[in-house]
Structures are given as C-alpha cells and as structure tokens.
C-alpha cells in the first residue's frame, strides 16, 4: 500500500459461500451491487458449453453457484476497500439471518 492507494494493477478478490444456490447467489449479487460494490458472480460451468450435460461435473457446478468476484484496481482507494468489506459483511449477515428465520 502507498498512501491510501493499493499498489497493484488490478485483481479480483474471490469469495465463496458454500451451499448457496443460483437464486440466492443472484439476489446477493444484486444487493452487493446496490451497495455500490463492483462484483460479478455469473460464471457458467464451462463444460456445459462443450456439450457435457448438467450433473456431469457436480463440483464445478457447485462452485459456479457459490463464487463471487470483487473487482479492485490501482485506482481503488484503500478506504473504499475497507468500506466494501464492511458492506459485504453486513449484507451477507443479513442474508444469513433471513435464511435462518425462514428455516424456523
């Protein structure tokens, strides 16, 4: 870090939420973007594009439902990264709490 700037050209910070499905992943991604975060999550299993049927590589399919990538580059001030981390925590906890209440 130099001052309040990170010293790399660009990176994706990858997070995984084991056990979630496509719908929760989409809703969570929308909530994160609504909070101003630059996040992507729509990564189709590549084997689907090569003629392999759904279910033939279940681990790949599971990962594609569970992964999020946050885009960060050299222009991202460090305080924005810290604020983004706090927003991620707040939003994920809200989703977790809602899921827990819905299960009861």
Image: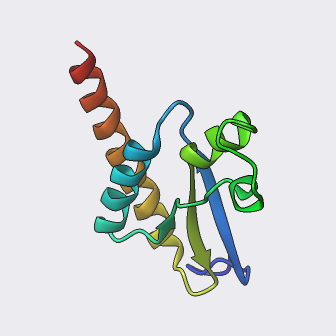
Residue 89, percent across and down? 40, 46
Q: Residue at x 22, y 23 (%)?
A: 102
Q: Nearer the viewer, residue 26 or 58?
A: 58
Q: Is 30 positioned to the left or the right of 20 in the image?
A: left
Q: Nearer the viewer, residue 90 or 65?
A: 65
Q: Is 12 positioned to the left or the right of 51 in the image?
A: left
Residue 82, percent across and down? 47, 62
Residue 65, percent across and down? 55, 45
**The C terminus lies in which quarter of the figure?**
top left
Q: Quadrant of residue 73?
A: bottom right
Q: Residue at x 61, y 49 (%)?
A: 64
Q: Residue at x 72, y 84 (%)?
A: 9
Q: Is residue 42 above or below residue 20?
A: below
**The N terminus lies in which quarter of the figure?**
bottom right
Q: Quadrant of residue 31?
A: bottom left
Q: Is 52 positioned to the left or the right of 63 in the image?
A: right
Q: Quadrant of residue 84?
A: bottom left
Residue 19, percent across and down? 52, 30
Q: Residue at x 52, y 79 (%)?
A: 77
Q: Nearer the viewer, residue 79 or 104?
A: 104
Q: Residue furthest bottom?
A: 75
Q: Is residue 42 above or below residue 36?
A: above
Q: Is residue 65 above or below residue 13?
A: above
């Amino acid at each position: 870090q130099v001052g309040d700037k990170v010293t790399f050209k660009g990176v994706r910070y990858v997070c995984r939420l084991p056990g979630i499905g496509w719908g929760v992943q989409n809703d969570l991604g929308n909530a994160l973007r609504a909070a101003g975060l630059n996040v992507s999550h729509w990564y189709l299993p590549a084997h689907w594009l090569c003629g392999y049927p759904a279910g033939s590589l279940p681990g790949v399919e599971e990962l594609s439902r569970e992964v999020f990538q946050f885009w960060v580059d050299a222009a991202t001030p460090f305080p924005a990264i810290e604020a983004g981390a706090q927003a991620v925590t707040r939003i994920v906890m809200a989703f977790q709490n809602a899921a827990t209440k819905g299960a009861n």
